Amino acid sequence: MKKRITFLLITASTALSILFGPDQLIKCRTKLKLYNTVEEIPHNKVGLLLGTSKYATTGQINLFYQYRIDAAVSLFTQKKIDYILISGDNGLIEYNEPRTIRNDLIKAGIPSESIIMDYAGFRTWDSVIRAKKVFGETKFTIISQQFQNERAIFIGARNQMELIGFNAQDVSKTYGARTMLREKLARINLIFDIIINKQPKYLGSTIVIE
């Protein structure tokens, strides 16, 4: 009985460490690199806007999407970034996150010449690594909700990049429950990506942002 209890305790402790360890590590290592207001955030040449779908499964506008658009526009209009690098999924002909985001940014008043497209940002990992290896940027601002900014900044730090994050408005806990569950799993997966030094799905020729 004692051996069984000990085994269960060790198993439970290991499971909790795997589940919550990466989450706490990422939060701890990135908290000083996050900004919530335009006034306090430093200027960077490039803001990396992380893509997501425009519409939720209900058919309504995805609030994660809308708030990221608002954040990017705010940074640009307040001259805290000079270019917006949109990185998102374009894995299917009928699904093109960067193009959709670009159209909405232009509607919001962002000049087209200040927008750069990355069509191979299938994951946060790919978006951050491609910003360095394809676009030659090692110091820039991540634009997303805080949870994704934390993970992106952590990825950057592990790849000799100097990143900060501008936190777009968050959603309610109820609205974002599924996303936050996926985030917990993504943080566990991130540790394995770092261990194996995973590379983006696609790279390609260098593109200079200027």
Image: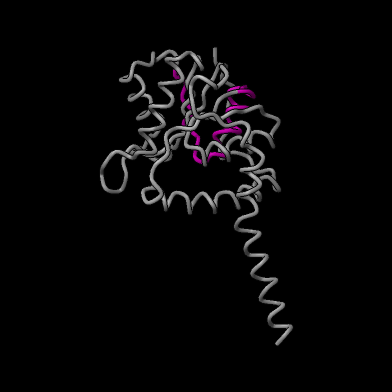
The foreground one among 208 and 139 is 139
Residue 92, position as x, y percentages in the image: 39, 40
- Judge from the rendering whether residue 48 lies leftward or rightward of residue 60; answer left or right: right
Whether residue 46 is situated above or below residue 68 in the rendered picture: above
Quarter of the rendering occupied by the C terminus: top right
The foreground one among 125 and 177 is 177
Residue 14, position as x, y percentages in the image: 67, 65
Q: Quadrant of residue 139?
A: top right
Residue 49, position as x, y percentages in the image: 47, 29
- Judge from the rendering whether residue 141 lies leftward or rightward of residue 171; answer left or right: right
Q: Residue at x 63, y 37 (%)?
A: 30
The foreground one among 69 and 102 is 69
The residues colored magenta run 115-139
Whether residue 23 is situated above or below residue 136 in the rendered picture: below
Q: Residue at x 35, y 38 (%)?
A: 63
- The colouring scheme, among rainbow, by chain, secondary structure or one colour, is one colour
The foreground one among 156 and 118 is 156
Residue 32, position as x, y percentages in the image: 63, 32
Most extreme residue toward the left, as rendered? 59
30 within the magenta span: no
Q: Quadrant of residue 131?
A: top right
Most extreme residue toward the bottom, as rendered? 1
120 within the magenta span: yes
Quarter of the rendering occupied by the N terminus: bottom right
Q: Residue at x 42, y 39 (%)?
A: 170
Q: Residue at x 66, y 27 (%)?
A: 162
Instruction: Tell me how many marks there are.
Output: 0
